[in-house]
Image: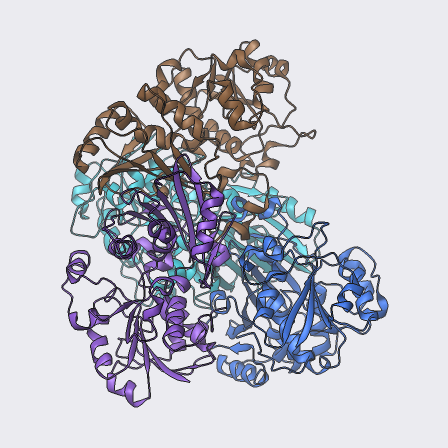
Chain colours: A cyan, B purple, C brown, D blue
Amino acid sequence: MTKVAILGGSGYTAVELIKILLRHPAVEIVAVTSRSEETPLVAELHPSLTGRLDLRCQVFQPDRLVARGVECVFSCLPHGASMEAIPGLLERGLRVIDLSADYRLRDPNVYGQWYGESHRDLAHLAQAVYGLPELYGDELPTAQLVANPGCYPQAPILGLAPLVTGRHIDLKSIIIDSKSGVSGAGRTPKLDFHFPECNESVCAYGVGKHRHTPEIEQALTDLAGEPVEVLFTPHLIPMNRGIFSTIYVTPRRAFTDAQLLELYRAYFTQAAFVRVLDRLPATKDCLGTNFLDLTVRCVRGRILVLVCEDNLIRGASGLAVQNFNRMYGHDEKTALL
Amino acid sequence: MTKVAILGGSGYTAVELIKILLRHPAVEIVAVTSRSEETPLVAELHPSLTGRLDLRCQVFQPDRLVARGVECVFSCLPHGASMEAIPGLLERGLRVIDLSADYRLRDPNVYGQWYGESHRDLAHLAQAVYGLPELYGDELPTAQLVANPGCYPQAPILGLAPLVTGRHIDLKSIIIDSKSGVSGAGRTPKLDFHFPECNESVCAYGVGKHRHTPEIEQALTDLAGEPVEVLFTPHLIPMNRGIFSTIYVTPRRAFTDAQLLELYRAYFTQAAFVRVLDRLPATKDCLGTNFLDLTVRCVRGRILVLVCEDNLIRGASGLAVQNFNRMYGHDEKTALL
Amino acid sequence: MTKVAILGGSGYTAVELIKILLRHPAVEIVAVTSRSEETPLVAELHPSLTGRLDLRCQVFQPDRLVARGVECVFSCLPHGASMEAIPGLLERGLRVIDLSADYRLRDPNVYGQWYGESHRDLAHLAQAVYGLPELYGDELPTAQLVANPGCYPQAPILGLAPLVTGRHIDLKSIIIDSKSGVSGAGRTPKLDFHFPECNESVCAYGVGKHRHTPEIEQALTDLAGEPVEVLFTPHLIPMNRGIFSTIYVTPRRAFTDAQLLELYRAYFTQAAFVRVLDRLPATKDCLGTNFLDLTVRCVRGRILVLVCEDNLIRGASGLAVQNFNRMYGHDEKTALL
Amino acid sequence: MTKVAILGGSGYTAVELIKILLRHPAVEIVAVTSRSEETPLVAELHPSLTGRLDLRCQVFQPDRLVARGVECVFSCLPHGASMEAIPGLLERGLRVIDLSADYRLRDPNVYGQWYGESHRDLAHLAQAVYGLPELYGDELPTAQLVANPGCYPQAPILGLAPLVTGRHIDLKSIIIDSKSGVSGAGRTPKLDFHFPECNESVCAYGVGKHRHTPEIEQALTDLAGEPVEVLFTPHLIPMNRGIFSTIYVTPRRAFTDAQLLELYRAYFTQAAFVRVLDRLPATKDCLGTNFLDLTVRCVRGRILVLVCEDNLIRGASGLAVQNFNRMYGHDEKTALL
């Protein structure tokens, strides 16, 4: 039984994480922290947990977590706050899965450029493993610090991995058009996410500026062995959860749909949570699950990759548990089906 | 051509009011005020007005409105703020239609009890006309100050008027169960109205405490000639607009559905915006309109009145223009079809 | 390991049932039937099951189920079809949990009156147990045929049980105003449930005629020991799942909120899936769970009981598994948390 | 006063058309046809019209329309049915605005290829004017037959017109990713548009096969003076109305955002219903209007054009009235603001 703590317990990723971990036979949640001075019951922050978790939020104190026997910490803090909290945990020997952006970008200059502040924990940044198990899974068993990917990047990274790895596409041609439910924007009320403002409407946002862009590029560059730039446009959709990513690339040679599907099936044969589909996917079919559903099509000389995920599970908390399972030698699917 | 001003231009009732008034052949909007220090274009606050209204918001100054030739002012300010602004307008001879709650309750003690603050403009409160034209329409042509009803009260007031007027029901039996879209909560972001919190969920709120209760009771008391108390429960529904009110009362004698429909049709024969339906109503059918749709049924010894309205039009801005039309001698339907 | 079959596999209750049973450590799904002539993969009917259940739908043949070793059958067939299929299963010694209405009403005349057809399996009707474990749980371990309750009735039955059992209310005063998501209407496309017809709208339906009325009355009559009639009005809400029931009754004596909450907490102390809350409930907090969340309030001389549930889990498939767990001696919560 | 008839009165475009025409000071609706044998009141098909239009649907008979004095007919029939009905009207001298696809594609072979049936009215096809007034407006005053554009094509056609006309882009680079509300799929119930199937989900459909593709290509080819092919991917979004189109093209030379906005503003200076915005558009801001809202951005070497419209108004019925206004010499905006 591994004792775990969750930092930043008030948001959507935290509550999903708690629900998954409550199902995990080898995990005990012993602490949940929140930044507020008060120490409410976790179930007061998240009424859906009523009767399920009898813990009171506590202020973050590394020594207190050690004293409680915590071995692994999930950080649901926002970026910036995460890299303040995590060094003290690592120094005390704890393992950390960070759901924020703080340890995802290996180059601190890129971090500074996109996040508008300098990175303040270069030492640990260098040792962080990017927690996308389908690509970096071998590093997880020994990792002390895992940077859980953002919700958007997984779809284009995994969705293009077979094509980029096989050098089948023009690397300058990548366009990613993503449609996300509103929970991806977090739980802090703002006019843009006020119900009557986003219900019955669609809009693009962060055009050319979304912070998940360099994360996509870093992983695709790893796969390609040469620099990759992408054009990424996120859109806000009137639904709670789910991301649909439509990816457009130019192939270097002609493919049939069948060839592409075969290529993808071969590539993902070991990936328990990637479902390569014949039919067109819909986000509802992976809602509440850790599955990444995708298909691929040739249309008018281009390849389209269509990828669906639940942004809070596969895009955050479910993937964090998948990483945890790999780190601790559990079956990758434990608590996730 | 009547020159009008709108106070408190940043909310949902203001933008709906502006759209209706832009269609009104006898109205010119010459000023929109907002409480912020900045003076943005109205179309910056409400992008849907782009290209339609070339006005910049101004700070509220009564003399400036008079200088601009304003004759009639619509106040979309919140309660409390309205009774600060309105006295100065009335003293300068302007007519005012107030969409807030400040002048709706004739008894200032009731106001104090439900709104938690003393009324600060007793002089004008005494002369205010409750702007429900189907009941108080005769007072509108000469009114200087009209208190536009709240969004919820109209449905039970008009929905019960034929029964209460005819003394057909037990006045102690009235239960009103209302279901409202989220725009009724206004445009200020709060966690309760954050998209992922209210989408895909229903809840009751303000149980036993909603401030529209005394407004319903005041009008029904007028109709009954004796004190009426009601049990009113509002619910929040995941849609932008619309209120569906299900009203339960105990009749004093047996009715058939046909008798009830006939009674209602006779009562509302002159009411241009009340549609008495054979079928069960749905809010979508009066969405964006000034119609109040209703039907009535006998079930197991009780009478059910089912009433639909658009909370922003019939429940606020459309009704304000209907009141304006009556005040200024225009056809009641002008700009409202 | 109990081998189970699911009849009528194409609808929403079937897919939810399958997902729960896939998590059940003591259950193996060995057959899913559908009425169509084709025998598609279950995952073709329900793409969310891709990679999770490798079964092909089969035509219903009792002997084939027996040959496969099936011990327990869940029927998700519509009413009418269920009482055609079930006798043959019972005669072969299988146990059956029927999610249709066919075996819920003990009096076949009441069935005939509300469902418009005669009951065709009176023999087994007489032995069916109404599968509401909080009330009839003692009969479940020995039951061969369990009639799983409708989605609406549980809320008023359990929501009023403490008051009716304690003889605290006027039994003629019961009004139930329920608000349901659209999945409750099933998966067959009809204009009323076409997306643009029910999105952004609320309506009442089945006023005075909804078939769950006699089911509510039967259970409350059991509790009261005398005939109970209720006024039940369902409404359709633009969301996928969830039922919010607002129940109005007249108490025989005065209560405080605290007294009521204490009464309810005492009554439900053994009920693993009933959560008595201080706060007002919202359907989102029990979404996807088997919990029934409720609170109770005194307002203006009446008692309000506010009850939330997920119509497909607590209102159908989750409750069916709760019944299964009781029938087979498993912990009641198995596969349900 | 022009007497008009509407063919195919049961769908969403028909009811929107009726509502707009009821506001038109120079139009009288004298007939609405439907294909059913019954002759219901139009307000029975569309309850929102209760009290607004006292017409009974009639079976389509050209001579009966002539006898009623009809001068102009709007056809809301589906494709295939429209080209059956329209020849008889044209031969009787009536003018026709066809909202179906039947007369949009000048080349009948292209029609046959995309619609799977031969065109059956080649004579009139040759004389039809494509009713996009911003491009083909000069032909409208004398047109007898106007083919109203599809809902999707207008956004890419007008959104790319300034770039294509100015030869600023690589014509082989055009990718159009569109997101549409569900009303675009019509009013016939199908599983794909059943509320619980499309609420809380996003999917792509018709990938590489959507019938609006050749319509986009025809108009862009006109503008370019050489053949243009596009890659068009529509998506279904859980909302009633609105289309958001994200268009990606490769420019032939570098542009700043300011240069692009200036180019677009100059191009659309005479277009009353095209709003070129500095900010990113959202579909809610043109909901229920005839406006096409757009902006344009340079990102990582590509140009993005972001276009919003209401699919039923600008995408169908509003545009039909704009065409009517041009055909009959009215101010283009009549009844549309």
Residue D269 in the image, given as x and y percentages of width and height: 56, 85
Q: Nearer the viewer, residue B263 or D97?
A: B263
Q: Nearer the viewer, residue D37 or A187?
A: D37
Spot occupied by residue A234 in the image (x, y as percentages of width and height): 47, 61
Q: Relative to C155, is B75 above or below?
A: below
Q: Measured along the vertical axis of the image, is residue C305 above or below residue A183? A: above
Give the farthest residue toward the right.
Answer: D123
In the rendered image, which quarter is residue C42 located in?
A: top right
Q: How far across and down, in percent of the image, does residue D131 sit?
A: 69, 73
Residue at 19% of width from left, 37% of height from top? C257
Viewer-closest of D9 and D317: D9
Give how far across and how far down residue D132 sits, in percent. Answer: 66, 74
Q: Residue lying at the far bottom in this picture: please name it.
A: B67
Residue at the image position 60 percent from the left and 36 percent from the top: C45
Q: Is residue D324 left or right of residue B237?
A: right
| Nearer the observer, D255 or D101 | D101
Relative to B298, residue D297 above or below: below
Q: Is residue D131 left or right of residue C274?
A: right
Residue B195 falls in which quadrant of the image? Answer: bottom left
Residue C31 appears in the figure: no
- What is the count of numbered marks? 0
Q: Is residue C174 visible?
A: yes
Quadrant where the image shows the N terminus of chain D: bottom right
